[in-house]
Image (cartoon, grey):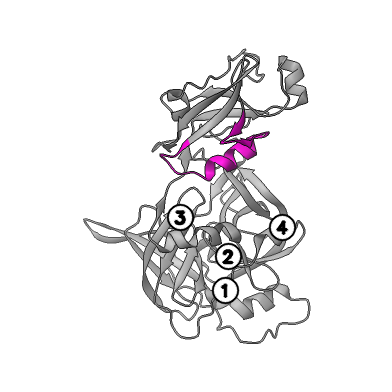
Amino acid sequence: MLAVFAVGVAGAAVGLRWLGPEPAPASEPVVMARPVANQTAAPGNVAGSVYDAVGSAVVEIVTSVEGRLGTTPVGGGSGVVVDQRGLVLTAAHVVEGVENVRVRFSNGEVREARVLGTDTGNDLALLQVELPEGIAVAPLGDSDQVRVGDVVVAIGSPFGLEGTVTQGIISAVNRTWQPGDGRTRTGLLQTDAPINPGNSGGPLFNVNGEVIGITTMIESPIRGSVGIGFAVPSNTARRMLPQLEAGAQLQPAWLGISGVTVDAALAQEQGLSIDRGVLVASVVPDSPADQAGLRGGEDTGDGSVPRGGDIIVAIDGTTIETMDQLVEQISRHAPGDTVRLTIVRDGRQQEVTVTLGSWPAEAP
């Protein structure tokens, strides 16, 4: 099956949907109860225990823009307080393109917030806001310790309903998916905890009340949850926090190819000299890959994988055996970085230097 990377192919009927921005609610918000210091929920009530401990760390984010008729609400999402200095983690797409950001706390207070930094490649943003008294700070957990089947709790403001709590499990880890913008996301946590529009940027907690993910998107044919949600791992957020706090506006690097993982079956089918790596199926015109001279395959017209393209087997000396590995390595770079690709062309190994670009405004 062709795995698309940095090309931007439209999804099928069942597709990935960003969880926000959710239109701002017209009615008064539901106010979350103030959490207590001790977990007093009934035995076995995991969601209740987590809510009591760190529920007030979860905030609703309301965004607006300035126009000729004044300030117009445009949507919002959720976020989580991760530092007593008022640092709030959320999803980058929640605050993208807006001019005003406000944070509504569990006690009903609403305060202006400032966007410190964004990372669109990982869909993360960091806000700063003055915290009211009594607001909890949620600790970041170790997402590398998350296992399939672990119980998780999501808290957020789906459809503007602040303080909504849902529970589920981790359905998969290290998931790779591609939303409608064509950019491939890797390393995601997948959960069946009900997540809906407005949950964007909200936390996914483990049973200890630690943030192990920031919700980012759902897989659904409808505007709602069908049990497949995705979250950016907390360790990714932890790694990016210093840059975001320093004001970085991070953009994902762009190579500009579509490709497929080479395995034994494909190697035999196409008579390839190797059975690992990434076969370049096509190259986007005028992309960094095109400018570096990477060669795509020829479409046979029968729906099979294009033949004759370059096979990428390493990047900067790091072995590449799958598309996921290539995507992950490219994601470590920024636009303008130069990488050295080791490729196999017509059975011979050679090196190609590519200067990575920025994603185009519209997915190619």
State the CA–CA distance, disc 3 to disc 4. 23 Å
- Which residues lie in the magenta part? 313-338
- Classify 289 as above or below 176: above
Q: Is residue 26 visible?
A: no
Q: Which mark is residue 203?
A: 2
Would residue 120 be found to the left or right of residue 13 on screen? left
User: Pointer 2: residues within 10 angstroms few (<14), some, or many (20+)?
Assistant: many
Q: Which mark is residue 170?
A: 4
Examine the image and state in which quarter residue 41 appears. Answer: bottom right
Circles 2 and 1, Cβ within 8 Å, touching? The answer is yes
State the CA–CA distance, disc 2 to disc 4. 14 Å
Q: Position of residue 285 (x, y in %)?
A: 43, 23
Image quarter where the C terminus lies is top left
Q: Nearer the viewer, residue 61 or 137?
A: 137
First-in-chain label (3 vs 4): 3
Which amino acid type corresponds to the residue marked 1 in the rendered image? Ala
Q: Residue at x 45, y 55 (%)?
A: 92
Q: Which mark is residue 92?
A: 3
Q: Which residue carries the number 1 mark?
A: 138
Which amino acid type corresponds to the residue marked 3 in the rendered image? Ala
Q: Secondary structure at mark 2?
A: strand
First-in-chain label (3 vs 2): 3
State the CA–CA distance, disc 1 to disc 4. 20 Å
